Image (spheres, rainbow, N blue to C red):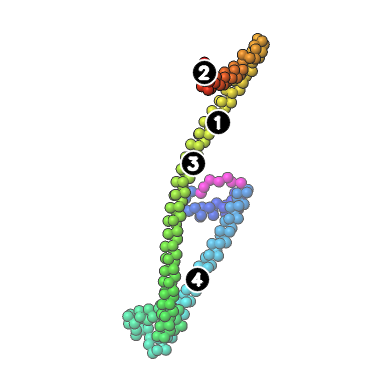
Amino acid sequence: MSEKTIKVSKWLSNLFGNKPVPVYEVNTRTTDILYELAECSESRCGDISLLIEDLKQKSTEYNVEGSYNQELLLEAVGLSSNVLSKTALGCLNALEGTTVALSAKDTSLCSLMAAMDDLTNEVCAAERNNQELDQQLTLLKKQMTTALVLHRSLQEDLGKTEDAQAVEMAKAENRLQNMDFLKAKSTDLIHRIRSCEKKLNTSGMDNSLSHQALLNLSEKLTTLKQENTSLKKSWTPIWI
């Protein structure tokens, strides 16, 4: 086995621990890729280890410096950590923590009160901001409710419109079918009429016996009857 393959195998074994290493196709390309990943991983792990050691060293240094500064502070006020009770040390630590939390410049009463005032102002400003946000949220809820109601109304109107459109389309389709039927029937009747006219012309029928001629004669007869009736009503017999 090559050096790259051995290193890749060790790296995968350490990476997956007790779990089995997934099966992969071993070839030159996959070996090179996994080897580069192993190199990067080892380099990153080394950097992290150095960073952890550095942080541990700084933490130790900060603890030593803090203890030294605490001793200096106690000596400045004529005290020693050896003669302070646990309650006093607790109060001192609480005072220190409060000063740090309030970002005060020192532990004097003026600095603490000023920091408390600043913190109170920040709290009031945050409360006012929360009230404004609550008002905006209430307004948005109302607008959302109105929008939802309008959306539902529009959906209902849309459904009714679609139903009416479907009915109208069905009626239009029925009308088109009837129109197509009437057109076909009209065309058939025209062909029949023309065929009958040809037959009549071939048989030598007189035009005076045609349907139209008979209708004209009927109209004339009706007119003559009406005129005759009018004459009878207006005629007065002369008796000698």
Quick one: 188 or 124, which is closer to the camera?
A: 188
Q: Which mark is residue 176?
A: 1
Tell me the element at label 1: helix
Q: Which mark is residue 55?
A: 4
| Residue 14 seen in the current view | yes
Could you tell which of marks 3 and 2 lies nearer the N-terminus?
3
Q: CA distance from mark 3 to mark 4?
A: 71 Å
Segment colored magenta = 21-27
Dot 3 and dot 1 residues touching (CB under 8 Å): no
Quick one: 48 or 197, which is closer to the camera?
A: 197
Dot 1 and dot 4 residues touching (CB under 8 Å): no
Q: CA distance from mark 1 to mark 2?
A: 66 Å
Q: Position of residue 75 (x, y in %)?
A: 41, 88
Say which residue label 2 marks.
237
Q: Nearer the viewer, mark 4 or mark 2?
A: 2
Tell me the element at label 3: helix
Q: Position of residue 12 (x, y in %)?
A: 53, 52
